[in-house]
Each structure stands twice: as structure tokens, then as C-alpha cells.
Image (cartoon, rainbow, N blue to C red):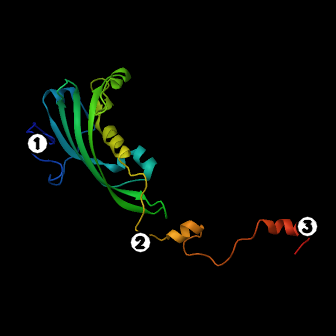
Amino acid sequence: MVTRDDGGFDRGRGSAYHCAPMLTSRLPGRVEPYKLVARAEHLEGLVALAEMARLAEEVGAQSGDAQVWLDFAIDPQGRREIRGHLQAELQLPCRRCLEPMAQQVESDFRLGMVTSDELAAELPSTHEPVLVENEQLNLLAVVEDELILSLPQVVYHDEAECPVSRDQLNSGEAPGGSDDSPASPFDVLRQIKGKP
């Protein structure tokens, strides 16, 4: 959905993305960002998580949608920028048991539009560079990049819910434990030497 700038988020009127109604429309895959900046446009919509191959490589296949809010503007220094917020519920692998668990991921970001690596190096630290090629911007790639950057480093189930306990993790015992003790690697040497 495309709307005119009405003050939007981060402009002192409250946070549109934290209290926004459920989004139902899809974001376009590609946009002409310079035109959107010139009109101070606001985009909001959904992006399918299943279409994000790089995210799937990081944390496994996903379903559902990411909700995204984007404001295109010119900052006080004359830089073309995109201010955005995204949120999604991802299924991330627990580091103890490797089973997927639901995790809410959110990100606020500020992107500076550039056409080369040289211009990207000139951006202040408050802006992440986003490359605009042939006056086109791939929004799916932008959203996927932000989701990947926002992934938590470590995710664990609560101990009561995880099939692998902390003790099993420390001892190396498999879940459901086995009473059979593994053969000692020295048993082979004892047999070779003929000792019991």
C-alpha cells in the first residue's frame, strides 16, 4: 500500500508501526526509490518469508510473512534515505536440541541510498548503505538483509520445555539417555597386547 507522508513514524507523532493494524497488502518486489523519496512516500505491507532463500540458508525454511513499514525521505543533510521497521515471527533452531522454536524478530533501520561503494563509504555511521542500480531497488533483498542482521545470536528453549537438559548437554549424553556405555578406545589395544 502506498500513502502520502502524514508525519509518519519517527516524526514526533507516535510510532505508527508499534500500534498499526494488521497489514494485509503485499510490498512490491521492486520500486523506484528516487521517485518515492521525491514524493516522501510511505510504504507498508507484507513480504513472504518463504521467498527468502538466504534467510532459509541461515535458519531453515520459514513460513508466514514479515510486516514492513518504510518511509522514503531526504534527511537534513540532503541524503536520500529509507527509514523502516520490520517484524516477523521466525522458527529458529534451539542451540540445545536443534528443534525449531518461535522467536519474534524486530528491527528499526535507516538506509542511505547509494549507487557505488565509494558513496557507501561516505555515509555516516547512522546509515547502512543500500545499493540502487538502474534507479531500481529490490525491496525483498532489503527486507531479507535486515532480517538476517536482526537474528539473535543464540536461541534456547526454556529448560522445562527443551528435550535436552543442561546436564545432558554438559555430559554429552544423548536425550533419552542410554545405559550402554561405549567401548573404551583402549579395549582394542588391550586385545592386541593380549591383556584382559
Residue holding disc 1: 12
Quadrant the C terminus occupies: bottom right
Give neighbour class at mark 1: few <14, some 14-19, many 20+ (Cα, 10 Å). Answer: few
Measure the C-alpha gap from mark 3 to mark 1: 82 Å
* Residue 142 place in picture, x, y as percent: 32, 38
In this view, the residue in front, 171 or 82, is 171
Residue 152: x and y, percent? 39, 52
- Residue 138 picture quarter: top left
Q: Amino acid at mark 1?
A: Gly
Q: Earlier in the sequence, mark 2 or mark 3?
A: 2
Q: Position of residue 16 (x, y in %)?
A: 14, 47
Q: Earlier in the sequence, mark 3 or mark 1?
A: 1
Q: Which mark is residue 161?
A: 2
Residue 20 has which mark? none
Q: Which residue is mark 3?
A: 193
Q: Nearer the viewer, mark 1 or mark 2?
A: 1
Cα distance, mark 1 to mark 2? Answer: 42 Å
Which quadrant would the N terminus be assigned to in this image? top left
Side of 185 where 134 appears, left or right: left
**Residue type of the residue flagged with mark 2:** Glu
Picture coordinates of residue 192 (x, y %)?
A: 89, 66
Q: Residue at x 86, y 69 (%)?
A: 190
| Position above or below: 62 against 31 | below
Of the numbered discs 1 and 2, the one sitting upstream in the chain is: 1
Left or right: 177 in relation to 140: right
Q: Say what secondary structure mark 2 lies in.
A: loop
